[in-house]
Image (spheres, rainbow, N blue to C red):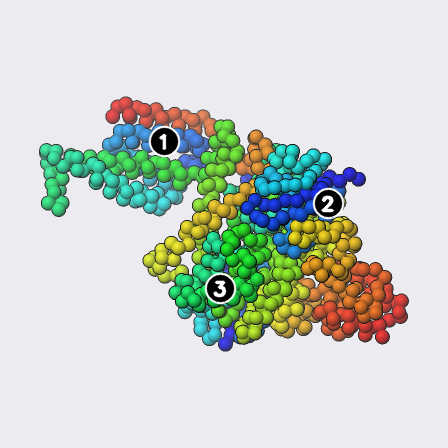
Amino acid sequence: MDSKFIQQFYQDKRGETWWQDIDPLCRFIMCLSLSVATFTIGSWQMGLCAVIFGFIIAGCTKKVKFYMGMLLLVFISAGILGAIVRIPPHLNDGGAIAFTIFGVSVPMSALMNYLDYLLMMEGFAGLLIVYFLTTEMRDICYCLERKGMSPKGTFLVLVAFSMITSIQQKLSNVRESQSARGIEMEGNFGVKVKTIIPILFPVIISSVTSVEERTLAMNARAFGASRHNSHLRNLKKAGALDIGLMWICVAVSVLLIVLF
Amino acid sequence: MEPIIEVKNVSYQYPLTDKLALDNVSCKFKQGKCYGIVGANAGGKTTLCNLIRGLVPHFYAGELKGDAFIFGKDVREWDEMKLSVKIGYVFQDPFAQISGVKQTVFEEIGIGLENLGIEHDAMIKKIIKIAGLLKIDYLFERNPMKLSGGQCQRVAFASVLVLDSDIIVIDEPTSQLDPEGSKEVFDIVKQLKENGKTVIIAEHKIDLLARYCDEIITMKEGKIIASGTTKEVLGNIALMEQGITVPQTVRLADKLKREGIVLPDIPLTREEAISLLKERGERHGN
Amino acid sequence: MAIELQNVTFQYPDANITALENINLMINKGERVAIIGQNGAGKSTAVKLMNNINKPTKGTVFVDGVDTKTKTTAEVSRKVGYVFQNPNDQIFCDDVRKEIRYVLERQKMPQEEIKKRVKDVMELTGIREYRNTHPYDIPLPIRRFLTIASVLVTDVEYIILDEPTAGQDMLGCNQLAKIMDYITAQGKTIITISHDMEFVAEHFDRVVVMAHKNVLIDGDKNSIFHRYDILEEAKVRSTEYSLIGKEIGIKEEVLALEELVAGIKKQST
């Protein structure tokens, strides 16, 4: 009698939540179409709606903390860039003054322009971020293979992404071994940064050089021997609901672009 | 019986090196036998394994002189992909063989089967069977990147065994394993042999090779310095002068001989030594 | 002057697995101790407590009388060196000499002193010919000597060798024995984990057998290697010669070849 763990391989994998149960490629097109609409329309209202939509998805999939963290990074970078490209050209616009800073009066129109940009970026990036936060790379690759992408290509994508984990793991091992050689690794954030920097580049290089060994190992597992791989883990095929939702999002995006 | 692998006067140098990794090496391998390759580190064991598997010259460039025939065809003419299916290879470094793209050991073992396009249910059955053989079914749900050396080694072995190749080349499969684990690996090697597979093992654990191998090839500085049946090669104490260990029972027989106690045969295993010593004891009325 | 584990229990924080349960072990300065046991018995976990890589969940670890909980891993590791089982976990420089020098340079040691120490340790470990080579271009067993060199160069008091003979040929084992003799001559302590019983019997005086997350038995090698019942419980074996001696009825304790031969000669007379 096969264990529960093995039994799951006999069934198509379902997503843990309603969002993750939608076909990964359909989900991607949904997010992409809405984020293109957000970018094209460029208004703070559309941006805010996109951010809220992202929050709903992140909330359902228990990824709110990560989502907020990524949004914060976007906020900082877009905030700085927006302050440079959106405010100065509108400083001489007439109308009500929103606020004065360092003796410079910032008109309402400049502020609104800035907010449009900031929230547009948050919405645009946020939708793509929430997609990648809630979708495993291997599921994306599985769907691409189903659409005809070569198994070699998808494997290379997966290996590239797994390099991140591999580098993290190697970094952790090297830090532990450096600690075991008497180099202080424990301490506040400053100490940690100071100790990571000298080893970061060599660790990345050594992770890359270990690709040769991994290539040989995959070679020993008949990598590329067949044009059509089979899969232990199968995802359910995109159903009418998945495709329907996808087209609704595309239609809504097109409509919004046309209207606004 | 015709050999399935034949190496004729092969010399090989890795790119950007100035030393021959293989120096005029000739040997043959027959189907259904187990061969041990022994010798000091950097003596050419791994390079010979790479040649048999076709990594030399397909993966490692460099100058290859002489000929190597796999199933009657020159290794240079073989399609590398087809050879990877015919000849399984388990590498020395267990950690480097984990793909990094699978989240469970179960899926990690199945990578080769996926690459071959094997039918879904058949894949599951094969994985369960091989994992049971190697006693790693308890690891199915574990992350392959978080295994110990011994666990990694068994998982790597399983993921090659599952391909059911005719020839399996194994480079030091037991370096990370405890004695029980090592014995289990060699028991599997014995089973493979009984199923008609050809197994070629590069190893340092001479006592285990003495027990399980039909023939031994000893290498030093890229040359084959001795080859033949296990008894012929490992029963020769003179190998020690070449820096190659012989089984402890052979050393025992040699030392006894120098003390005036001559055993009727050279024991290769503990059981043989005990049997010979007991027989001798009975004959001398002990 | 000793390393002491006092009623130590260790649980892996992210896996909720108890790897060691209420273990007591003391290793005095200058000793040569081998820890043997099946894979998963807790050997690596126990030795990683000794240099503070692992911190005890319960109980205390003392190194020369100091509670390791009051120190960082680096502080303890300046006394207790650990050579990892997988050299690739330890190596990250692109050149053998740089790898060995790395820690000394971080400690801001004078260049002349560094040069001398690096040269001496490369001679001792037999890796001088690889001094300008990339570590990943040297064979794995020889890479192990590089990691040993990198730890020895820091002049620690206690050295832990995790499976030092794995993948080593006869020359490698002889080199290892030479290194260990040098360490002992300096009055330092060697702790090893090994599956090579012959190597343990030849080079270590004291053997600690681990099983079921604890120490099963601890004593001198002669007494341990003849406790066949305990060794079987721990799923390890005695030496080949000892097992032969037992089967053919030699009454004296046999570990090494000479002892077995002497026993057989005596039996014959």
When asked about the image quadrant of residue A30, the answer is top left
Chain at tag 3: C
Q: Mark 2 — residue?
A: B27
Query: Would you identify the image quadrant in which residue B40 lies?
Result: bottom right
Q: Are marks 3 and 2 in contact (CB under 8 Å)?
A: no
Cα gap from disc 3 to disc 2, whole angstroms = 43 Å
Vertical order, A114 against B39 (above or below): above
Q: Secondary structure at mark 3?
A: helix
Q: Nearer the viewer, mark 2 or mark 1?
A: 2
Task: Give the residue drawn at x 50%, y 62%.
Answer: C150
- Measured from the top left, where is residue C191 in percent x and y? 56, 68
Residue at position x 62%, y 33% in the image? B79
Gap between marks 3 and 1 measured at Cα: 57 Å
Nearer the observer, C119 or B258: C119
Instruction: Specify the subunit that label 1 lies on.
Output: A
Quadrant (top left, top right, bottom left, bottom right) of the C terminus of chain B? bottom right
User: Depth check: B51 or A258 in front?
Assistant: B51
Which residue lies under the disc numbered 3? C118
How far across and how far down the image is residue C244, in percent? Answer: 76, 65
**Horizontal arrangement in the rendering, residue B50 relative to residue A109 (left or right):** right
Amino acid at the residue labelled 2: Cys
Percent across and percent down for residue A19 are 41, 36
Quarter of the picture containing the N terminus of chain B is: top right
Kindly identify which residue carries mark 1: A32
Element type where label 2 sits in the image: strand
Q: Residues within 10 Å of mark 2 (few under 14, many from 20)?
A: some
- In the image, what residue type sits under mark 3? Val
Tell me which amino acid carries mark 1.
Leu
